Image (spheres, grey):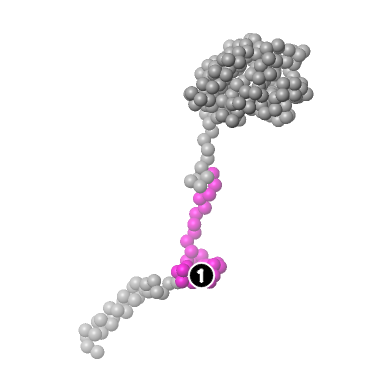
Amino acid sequence: MSRLGKISLLCGLCSIILWGCNSGCVSTVADSPEETGSTSSENTPEVPDISGPGTLDSPEEPDPIDWDDCGGKVGDHPCDFTFIDQNNNDWSLYDNYGTVMLLDFSTMWCYYCKVAAGHVQQMQDQYGPEGFLWVSVLVDNTAGDPPSLAEIQSWASTYGITSAPILAGDRSIIDTTAEDGYPLTSWPTFVIIDSDMTIYYGLRGWSEEIITQKIEELLYTLE
């Protein structure tokens, strides 16, 4: 073999040693589908686990309740409260963020509170599908004491209220300064809250016309 031929052969061998085989030497998934068993950890790179909170797969939802202060004036975030409802479940105001709500602060001895109660289910049926909730907070029973579960259940039955919460409240919710609670000085008192959990309107005394107007403003005009 000539010197030039030897050099060519050596270069060819060097090329094989340095670069190895191309695609013809390595089986792909498409070439060998017969097994999917265990593989050597030396040849299989580890895939980091990116599941769980705070990842792109399952991002954490920000808490919409991002304020520390509350009050009872128009423009304030209302103060949270938790009372039992007529189904004997805890009901909390802030759990209903995103809903337009009418807080109806009533007593069981008040005449116009009873008049208003007669409209609850009709308005809940009419506006509920639009994201509205009428919330009755009964502060006193007929004796001026906090109402019992049986008493709020009786109120629901008497006025045919089936899909709106009725809560067994008490006077701890009252703050006449409106700094840390609700300035309740007459019955009924209505507080309308928008879907951003901000007090939109307040009304002392019952007026179906005004209540309807303000609810429709929030549901159809401003929202």
Amino acid type for the residue under numbered disc 1: Pro
Q: Position of residue 169 (x, y in %)?
A: 69, 20
- Left or right: where does residue 158 sit relative to residue 44? right
Residue density around tag 1, few if under 14, some if 14–19, many if 20 or more, within 10 Å: few
- Per the image, label 1 sits on a secondary structure element best described as loop
Residue under the image location 53 percent in, 16 percent down:
74
Q: Which residue is mark 1?
A: 33
| Magenta residues, dominant SS class | loop
Give the answer, above or below, for where 147 lies relative to 13.
above
Would you say residue 67 is visible in this rendering? no
Rendered location of residue 2, percent (x, y): 22, 88
Residues in magenta? 28-53
Quadrant where the N terminus sits is bottom left
- Residue 39 falls within the magenta-colored stretch: yes
Query: In the picture shown, does residue 168 fall above or below 20?
Result: above
Q: Quadrant of residue 116?
A: top right
At 28% from the left and 78% from the top, the residue drawn is 11
Q: Is residue 168 left or right of residue 61?
A: right
Tell me, yes or no, whether the highlighted magenta stretch contains residue 218. no
Please give the name of the residue rendered at 54% of the width and 47% of the height, measured from the top-left corner. Answer: 52
Q: Quadrant of residue 65?
A: top right
Q: Position of residue 67 (x, y in %)?
A: 52, 26
What residue appears at the point 52 percent right and 67 percent down from the top-left corner?
39
Q: Nearer the viewer, residue 3 or 223?
A: 223
* 207 to the left or right of 84: left
